[in-house]
Every structure is written in C-alpha cells, then in structure tokens.
Amino acid sequence: MIPLSHFMFISAVLFCLGLYAVLTKRNAIQVLIGIEFMINAAILNFVAFGRFDKATGGGQMFALFTIVLAAAGVAVALAIILNVYKHFRTINPAKIDSLKD
Amino acid sequence: MMNDFIQNISPSINDTIRSLSLFYPEIGIATGFILVVLADLFFHRRSPQASFMLTILCLALVGCLNFSQLGYPAEAAFGGMIIVDRLAVVFKIIFCFVSVLFVLFVRYNQSLQNSSKGTGDLYSILLAVHLGLHLMVMSQNLVMIYLSLEMVSVGSYLMVGYLSGNPKQSEAAMKYALFGAVCSAFMLYGMSLLYGFTGSLEIYSPQFASFLITTPFASWGLGLIMLLTGIAFKLSLVPFHFWSPDVYEGAPTPVTAFLSTGPKIAGFALLIRILAPFQPFNLSGIDSSIFSMTTVLAVMAIASMVVGNFGAIWQNNVKRVLAYSSIGHTGFMLMALFVFSASGFKALIFYMVIYSIMNMAAFMIVDEIEERTGKQNIDDYKGLGKSFTVLMIAMVVVLVSLTGLPPTAGFTAKFLIFSAAIEAYNLSGSALMMIVIITGAISTVVSLFYYFRIPLNAFLRTGENQVTGIKGSPKVYITLFLVFLLIFFILFPSPIQKLL
C-alpha cells in the first residue's frame, strides 16, 4: 500500500514543473503542455484523496469531469494558437505584443 | 458491496425528478442552444436572421421562467449540487438582461454582420455561456463551481477569438485563453487540496468549514488562496487583471461589452457563495492572528481601485480606458462584501444592474463612433460633438453615471455601496476598512480626470476633418433607451429594489 503522502508529493512536483514550463517556455504550445501538467497534478490529488471517500466517490467523479474539460480547453486553445500563427508567423508569446500599454 | 448502493438508487432518482422542476430555465437555454445550432445549419441561407430571432425568443422565455421562480423558497437540487434561492434568481434575471443587450449589439454591429463566418455560431456560444452563468450563481459544490466556471471561460475564449480577422483579435484571444487556463489550473489544484483536507466537495456541509480550520494554516490557507485565484481572474481583480486591458481592446466591441458585465457579475455571485460558509469571518477561525480573509479582500479592493483608476489616466484608446475603469469598479464593488448581509448584497446587486447598463451603453457608443469614423482614440474625438451631438450627449450622461454623480443612477449605486462600507466600518471599527473607504472616495475623484477627457475633446476642441450626417441607427436608439434608464432609476429606484 503506497501512503497518501507519496501521491501528494508527486502531484506537488508535477504542479511546480507545469508552472515552471508556463513561466519559462517561449512557445505557446509548450505553455499549454505546462498547463496540462498543472491540471493533471490536481487530478492525481483528487484520485488519491478519493480513496478515502468511498461513500460518495466525489474525488473520482471530479477527476473524470476534469479530464473531459481539460481536453475541451486544450482544443479551443490550439484553435486560437493556429489563428495567431496565421497572423504573426510565430507562436512565441513574448514576440506577440501588438497589444500593450 | 453492490447491495449497499442498490438501496440508494430509488431515493436519488426521486430527487433528480423533483429537482427537474427547479431547472426549467436551464432546460430552456439548453433547448434554445440546440435549436439555434440547427437553425444556423439549415435556414442560414433562406433567412439569415433566424438564429437571431430564436436567441431573442429563447432569452425572453428564460427571463419569464426566472421571474416565475422569484417567489420560491430556497431549495437545494440534484443531490446538493445546486441551490435555487432568491439571490441566484435575481442574478439570473440580470444575466438575461445583459444577454439580450449583447444579442442586439451583435445584430447591429457591422463588422460582425459582414464577416464571412456569420453570427449564428456567436449566438449559440452565447447561449452556452449563459447556461454556464446560470449554473455559476447556483452552484454550491466544488464540481459544479469548476464546471460552470470552465463553461463560461471556454465560451468566452471562443467569443474573443470569434472573428480573428486581424492580428489584434487573435492575440487577445491567445492571451485570454493562456492566462485563463493557468488561473483555472491554480483553482483546480486549490480545490483538490480543500477536498483532501475536508473530505467533502459540498462547501455548505457543516464539516467543510470546521474540518478546514482544524488543519494547519499553511495547508488550508494555500488551498483557499488558490481557489480565490480562479475567481479573481474572472473578476479581473489586481493582481490578476493583466489580461483585461489587452482583451478588451482586441476583442470585437460587443464581446468586450459582454465580458465586462456578464462573467464579472457571475464572479461576484460565486465569491458570495464561497465566502458564505465561513461567515462570520472572526468566529469561523478564517480571520486568525496569522491570516485574515478580510485583509486579503481589503488589500485586493484597494489595489484594484488604485491600479484601475490611475492606470486609466495614461490610456488613449477608449476601450482600454473603459477596461481600466472596470477594474476600478470591481474593486469598488468588493467594498459591499465586507458587510456580509442582505444590506450589503442589495447594494452590490443594485450597483451591478446600473453598472451593466452603463457599460453596455458606453461600449455601444464607442462602437457606433468607431463604425462611422474609425476613431478609437480619445485624442481623435476632437470636434465629434458637432457631428454626433445626440450620441456625445448620451456619452456624457453615461460617463457622469460611471463617475457616480447625480442626476444619474450611478450616484445612487455608489451611495449604497458607500453606506454598506460605512456600516462595515461601524461594525468592525478596523482602520483597514477606513482606508478602503477613503481609497474609494479618492478614486472617484481621480476617475473624473479620465472620464471627462472624452467630452472635453468632443465639445471644447475642434477637429480638422468634420464628419457630417448621422442617421439614427438602431444602436443609437438602444443607447438612448439605456441612458433614459440611467436617469429613470435615480428618480424611481423602486423597480430594482423591489426585486431584491
């Protein structure tokens, strides 16, 4: 039996890796991958905690809904990034700055 | 193992069937969504405005259903997933009003009407977002909160990137989508932590608040702050406001008008729902010596008012000015939440109704002027008072209302918020509350500077090339009606107050 703390540790590491990717990557798709990491860290947490919530199964259910929503969100974001590429010929968020103060 | 669950089946089916009777407005929206999609598919060529008519009909029907729910007692539905109470119903009526204005705005916006994509999909996205807004104000379960928030967010990304006709629009959509996704990932992780500490997803169950406070502060504080991140993003509160000026400038103007009203109002409803289990703050232990929820909210309110109002002074693009001013307004509205009671909510809801009228009217005027002259910057507004006299006078009334001066309803709204904040100060007597109130007063004065640059340029300075001839367009008439409402509601505020 793997203790709960192991799951929480892995998920915290996964979340931090995702955040690091979001903050440092210079490619919108890599940023999206980072966001996926963060969402999956949360899903891991839900499933691990859900083991102690057998009566209602809330954690498992939440994890399922999240997986579906994450896929929907990524689909929309990819379509938007494709449009950005058509206009700018780059998907580096740092170089796309026609809107600024 | 299986037998444990079998006996639960019939009670839960009965509960679901009973709950359906509370769910008529949402069923109406879902049906309308399907009909609009089908109408756009099959009747697009024969009658291009079929989806417009259907959407308006659907929203009117949903509005009537919402009104019929006003008298209902508060009742939880679908196994405690949502709650239908008076607060939720009032918010739903406001959403119907905002959505109808948005649909009319889209109908009479040239750039959207002339685009090759057509507007049918925009209406169906609106109905999906509208369903999300409804669920947002009713949710009382973490799953429902996340689902509805994502429904609204994903729909909003699509709306912003709908045309993608020029680089600015696609850039705005990308910034919005990436920033929004990061904030919702933060919120999701916060939710997973809260679930772990409390063992429950229902924020109103008694174990939620009590279990949470018994865990060490370092863990529950982190979870709660992460949860608030997602909501602060929707509200564009400082420090999660970076997206809003860029998105407001880049998005098609009707979408901007919608984003600055609908999702923002729903964000406030969600904030009320999440903070309610911890009331009163000082008794539930959430305001302890190391951490104070009141302080966090107060600092956010002060920062939003300062950044919003001082940031707007340096802007030249009208839509950016309105974006910063809406950040300031959000901080201001947060003041009403420090008295967490019916009087605070009344002030907040009154302000929201007036705020949505003002913002819709302001963006409609900006859009009308942009369509006729192509001018988006305040400096270019010179001399427009001569050629667009009626429109610019309407703009002056809206700006006076946004500042919060009589004789417009903006004054009543600001007055109610200030009295709620002073009530909170009298109850708590904390110096921080006093600072919030003083910041609110100063920011109102500061807002005069940037709002009045528009009439100053339009009326008192002369431009080089005069644009002449203005025929009354439907958008002008809608604006005039909204301006009439602003003046009407200071004389007769009772229609709104009766609603509360």
Image (cartoon, rainbow, N blue to C red):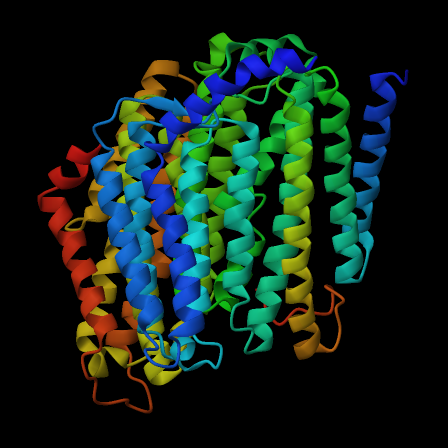
Q: Residue placed at 66% from the left, 69% from the top?
A: A97
Q: Position of residue B299 (x, y in %)?
A: 52, 32
Q: Residue placed at 21% from the left, 84% from the top?
A: B470
From the viewer's perspective, is residue B116 above or below residue A29? below
> Is residue B23 at least partly visible in the picture?
yes
> Residue B462 is drawn in which quadrant?
bottom left
Q: Residue placed at 57% from the left, 55% from the top?
A: B243
Q: Position of residue A30 (x, y in %)?
A: 80, 57
Q: Residue placed at 25% from the left, 65% from the top?
A: B395
Q: Position of residue B131 (x, y in %)?
A: 42, 46
Given residues B309 and B187, the one toward you in this image is: B187
> Residue B189 is drawn in which quadrant?
top right
Q: Position of residue B118 (x, y in %)?
A: 44, 76
> Residue B497 is drawn in which quadrant?
top left
From the viewer's perspective, is residue B425 above or below residue A78? above
Given residues B330 and B214, the one toward you in this image is: B214
Asked whether, in this view, residue B434 is left or right of residue B63, the answer is: right
Residue projecting furthest to the right: A1
Asked whether, in this view, residue B339 is left or right of residue B122, the answer is: left
Locate the C terminus of chain B by quadrant: top left
Given residues B20 and B251, the one toward you in this image is: B20
Asked whether, in this view, residue B282 is left or right of residue A77, the answer is: left
Given residues B451 and B108, the one toward you in this image is: B108
> Is residue A23 at least partly visible in the picture?
no
